[in-house]
Amino acid sequence: MKKMLVIRLGAIGDVVFTTIIPYAVKLMYPDCEIHYLVPNGIHKLLESNPSIDKVFTWERSKRKSLKYLISVARQLRREKYDAIFNLNNTLRCFLLSAFAMPKKIISKQSTGGHWVDDAFFAAKKVFPKLEKPNRLFLSVKPEAANKIKEDICNFPRPYIMIAPGGDTSKNRAGRSWNINSWKELSQMIIKEYGGTVIVCGSDSEKELHSALEGNGIVVLSGKYDLAESSALLSMADLMISGDTGPLHIAAAHNVKTLALLGSTSPEKIRPYGENGHWISSDFECKYCWKKKCKYVQEGETPCMNSLKASNVMEKIKKIL
């Protein structure tokens, strides 16, 4: 196989998990050409990756347009792929793969384990001798790195970065921790280690996160695009988050990461690699994978709400 396409139309973490394919393939077969089709915006994560030769973008706003789907498929067909990895179990992606007319279409392999393994074993269908790396890999654009270094150079180290989330809480119950718990934990970190707690997130989360500002805590939510945010996360001494895109970006940079897990399970989505760690409460129905929680109260789920800042702090001490 000389030329391949990876299709992953999902959230940031979903796309990051699939980067095991180009990383593993290029380590053994450096002459293989690998392209990607990902949602617009997320493409900024992949553009400077030396294992990825070309990135196509998918406009979410046009996803219901058959005319748009056909135009993208025609664009892909011109590439004459030997293989397409269709890593979405949707009719839309099946049609894209089929209309592109590759020599072979490989679907996502369900291993029952980590989602990185699902992507990797899809690649094994084409490259049986492929060896799985023990980490993921993302690169950083030099201009983005220089901008971030200049912005944070006067912040005292260590850099403990947190992504409290909030933007998608209504649709992803069991993945967000109470903002007051984040504040309590941040104050514990500053007291124990000094340094700077850097708060990361989207522009729509900035108002919520502003409650954390002050006393060694800096809120940078909404300040950077995805490429710049990736550069920021690559400079963390520790990244702490629920099951979010920033968590998995940091893990792909081989940063020490700590996931606070509620409805999603460590077997499938823990931060990948030897520097990935996780903690959860003992609540009876954790890891349920449900988007809506029947026990939710005032926007909070008991699986996350019962996770105490003191327990998280003890885990941080072990990691650092």
Image: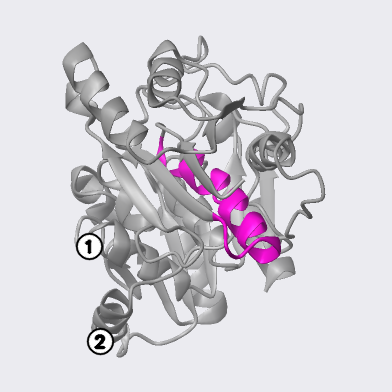
Residue that lies at the very extreme toward the bottom in this rendered image? 154
According to the picture, the residue beneath numbered tag 1 turns out to be: 224
Examine the structure image and report whether residue 21 is included in the region drawn in magenta: yes
Say whether residue 299 is left or right of residue 31. Answer: left
Q: Is residue 152 above or below residue 134?
A: below
Q: How many marks?
A: 2
Q: Secondary structure at mark 1?
A: loop
Q: Amino acid at mark 1?
A: Tyr
Q: Residue at x 56, y 45 (%)?
A: 17
- Which residue is disc 2 drawn over? 150
**Picture residue at 65% right of the left edge, 42% below the top:** 116
Q: Can you give x and y, in whole percent of width and height, for residue 225 in the image?
A: 23, 58
Please say if 256 is above or below 41: below
Residue kind at label 2, given as amino acid type: Glu
Residue at the location (17% across, 16% down)?
Answer: 67
Above or below: residue 152 compared with residue 160: below
Give the residues drawn in magenta, as a range.
Answer: 11-32
Instruction: Report the front residue among 280 and 135.
Output: 135
Q: Main secondary structure of the magenta part?
A: helix
